[in-house]
Image (spheres, helix red, strand yellow):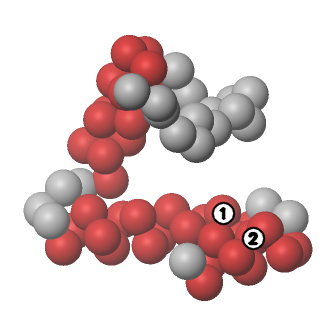
Amino acid sequence: MEEVNEFLESSNPDELSDIIEVVRALGHTFEKPLVELIDMAKKKRKERGGFDSKIVLIAVEE
């Protein structure tokens, strides 16, 4: 979260590389290489859409 907060506070694209490094390290912990995580994200984006529009679902009522 620290890296994400640093990016949000600065809007500096260089901070995005730190976020990617955190994701890479977490993937390593779960034996998922970064390339596999990216493939998983592409599949989800294709099935569910992405975040390019900056629209985020907050809740679902049942």
Q: Is residue 34 left or right of residue 14?
A: left
| Foreground: disc 2 or disc 1 | 2
Q: Is residue 45 left or right of residue 40?
A: right
14, above or below 61, in the image:
below
- Percent coordinates x, y for residue 50 in the rendering: 56, 28
58, above or below 29, in the image:
above
Q: Amino acid at mark 1?
A: Leu
- Percent coordinates x, y for residue 51 in the rendering: 62, 34
Q: Looking at the rendering, which quadrant does residue 12 occupy? A: bottom right
Q: Looking at the rendering, which quadrant does residue 17 occupy? A: bottom right
23, above or below 53, in the image:
below
Going from the N terminus, do you reach mark 2 or mark 1 first?
2
Which disc is residue 16 wearing?
A: 1
Q: Mark 2: few, some, or many residues within 10 Å (few <14, many ≥20)? A: some
Residue on which disc 2 sits:
7
Which disc is residue 24 wearing?
A: none
Q: Secondary structure at mark 1?
A: helix
Q: Are marks 2 and 1 in contact (CB under 8 Å)?
A: yes
Residue shown at 66% from the left, 63% from the top: 16
Q: Secondary structure at mark 2?
A: helix
Q: Amino acid at mark 2?
A: Phe
- Percent coordinates x, y for residue 20 in the rendering: 51, 63
